[in-house]
Amino acid sequence: MELSNIEKLLERYFEATATVAEEEMLREYFAQEDVPLHLKEYAPMFQYFSIAREEKFTRQVPLKPRKKSYIKWISIAAVSILIFGIYFGRSYQEQREAEYAYQETKKALSLLATNLGKGTEKVAYLREFEETKQKIYNKN
């Protein structure tokens, strides 16, 4: 392969415009022993990439349960408790308001009954007055 062609491929590689096939050509070129001196500094890099490509991780990684799922369930429980609290708190508040309204209505009706009783006493006097008046008019 020509030296100028390799230099152009290196330039394209560092600009990240080289294709996979061109990168493979560079790896093969730098795997050779007869690399020019001014390009020798790139040889270890491409040799490392070739070696690293062959490596495989074989050890098992123990997976720990994520703590975020616990946080999710705790937040769901907190929200549900909050909703139940608001619902039952509101119904308790409505019950207290209804009881207060009942007591106030009871007081008002009691007052009305008392005043109505006084009014009926007055009507009884009026009836006596009317009867007496009728007797007086009838005698004349």
Image (spheres, rainbow, N blue to C red):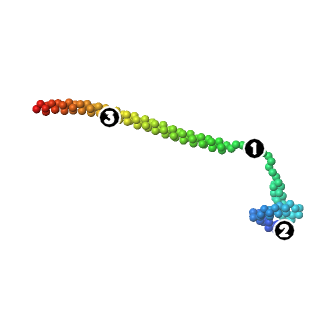
Q: Which of the 4 quarters of the picture holds residue 42?
A: bottom right
Image coordinates of residue 60 in percent, x first then y, are 78, 45
Residue placed at 66% from the left, 44% from the top? 68
* The disc label shown at residue 3, or none: 2
Relative height, residue 121 to residue 1 (above, below):
above
Residue placed at 88% from the left, 63% from the top? 34
Instruction: For residue 79, say whether it is visible.
Output: yes
- Residue of label 1: 62
- Residue of label 3: 112
Q: In which quadrant will I find the C terminus?
A: top left
How far apart are the alpha carbons under marks 2 and 1? 49 Å
Say if mark 1 contacts mark 3, CB within 8 Å.
no
Q: Give SS at disc 2.
A: helix
Residue placed at 46% from the left, 38% from the top? 94
What type is the residue that disc 1 sits on?
Pro
Label 1 or label 3, whichever comes before in sequence order: 1
Badge 3: residue crowd in 10 Å (few <14, some 14–19, many ≥20) = few
Instruction: For residue 42, say whether it is visible.
Output: no
Relative height, residue 113 to residue 22 (above, below):
above
Image coordinates of residue 114 in percent, x first then y, are 31, 32
Label 2 or label 1, whichever comes before in sequence order: 2
Image coordinates of residue 118 in percent, x first then y, are 27, 32
How far apart are the alpha carbons under marks 1 and 3? 81 Å
Which of pointers 2 and 1 indicates the residue nearer the eye? 1
Say if mark 2 contacts mark 3, CB within 8 Å.
no
Instruction: Name the outermost residue toward the right.
Output: 33
User: 81 or 137, which is in the foreground?
Assistant: 137
Residue placed at 65% from the left, 43% from the top? 69
Image coordinates of residue 79 in percent, x first then y, are 57, 42
How far apart are the alpha carbons under marks 2 and 3? 115 Å
What type is the residue that disc 2 sits on?
Leu
